[in-house]
């Protein structure tokens, strides 16, 4: 039986760290200048880049950082490593969109075949887009977290939100790697 570590509250689980380290399929790395420049602020987020970290503030409830993930092929499981300093205990919300097939993805009628063959009419969408999100608690101080993201058919960027206010967070490292299927859950602590 194969298990997926889909519970995002299991941050920093030893299994996630091992899987992250074993993967060489990097989808985003804040230490690569090309990736760093693709981060987009939204909702009044302010950030600056120093030689050691990314300083960021989330002033409003809807403030977020949009982090694009390189999509080479469909994703199995993303694991993000986040090395962050927060002066207080905080909350991190991660949101993203997954594309899911609809029940109409297969041709079921002869008319579907004819429409496709002769390119008649506008084809109906064969997919739905569903937003997924979860929230995890982060401890005050500097720590490294490993967070699983179930993004099998990711559409668009990841959206990161930290507790809004005047708090400045320092992100020293943020890297996302893809873990291909199959993988198994290790229940060791």
Image (cartoon, helix red, strand yellow):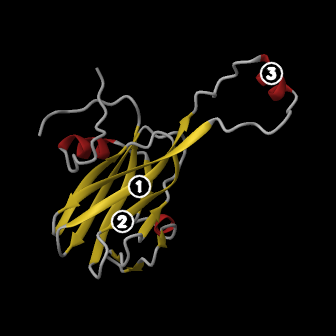
Total marks placed: 3
Q: Which quadrant: the C terminus?
A: top left
Depicted 86 relative to depicted 70: above or below: below
Residue placed under numbered mark 2 in the picture: 161
SS at circle 1: strand
Q: Are marks 2 and 1 in contact (CB under 8 Å)?
A: yes
SS at circle 3: helix
Q: Mark 1 vs mark 3: which is more N-terminal? A: 1
On screen, residue 72 versus residue 186, left or right, reads right
Q: Foreground mark, 2 or 3?
A: 3
Mark 3, other Cα within 10 Å: few <14 / some 14–19 / many ≥20: few
Residue placed under numbered mark 1 in the picture: 95
Q: Foreground mark, 1 or 3?
A: 3
Which residue does the image show at 37% across and 28% down from the upper left?
182
Q: Is 7 or 80 nearer to us in this picture?
A: 7
Q: Mark 2 vs mark 3: which is more N-terminal? A: 3
On screen, residue 3 versus residue 127, left or right, reads left
Instruction: State the mark number for residue 111.
Output: 3
SS at circle 2: strand
Depicted 104 relative to depicted 17: above or below: above
Depicted 100 relative to depicted 134: above or below: above
Which residue does the image show at 43% across and 60% down from the upper left?
159
């Amino acid at each position: 039986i194969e298990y997926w570590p889909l519970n995002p509250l299991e941050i920093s689980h030893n299994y996630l760290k091992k899987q992250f380290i074993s993967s060489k399929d990097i989808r985003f790395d804040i230490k690569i200048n090309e990736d760093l420049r693709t981060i987009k602020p939204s909702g009044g987020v302010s950030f600056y880049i120093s030689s050691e970290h990314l300083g960021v503030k989330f002033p409003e409830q809807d403030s977020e950082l949009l982090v694009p993930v390189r999509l080479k092929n469909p994703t199995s499981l993303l694991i993000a490593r986040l090395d962050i300093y927060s002066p207080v205990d905080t909350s991190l919300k991660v949101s993203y969109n997954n594309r899911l097939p609809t029940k109409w993805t297969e041709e079921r009628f002869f008319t579907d075949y004819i429409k496709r063959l002769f390119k008649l009419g506008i084809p109906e969408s064969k997919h739905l887009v569903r937003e997924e999100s979860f929230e995890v608690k982060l401890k005050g101080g500097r720590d490294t977290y490993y967070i699983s993201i179930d993004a099998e058919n990711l559409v668009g960027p990841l959206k990161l939100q930290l507790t809004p206010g005047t708090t400045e967070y320092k992100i020293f490292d943020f890297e996302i790697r893809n873990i291909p299927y199959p993988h198994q859950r290790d229940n060791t602590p």
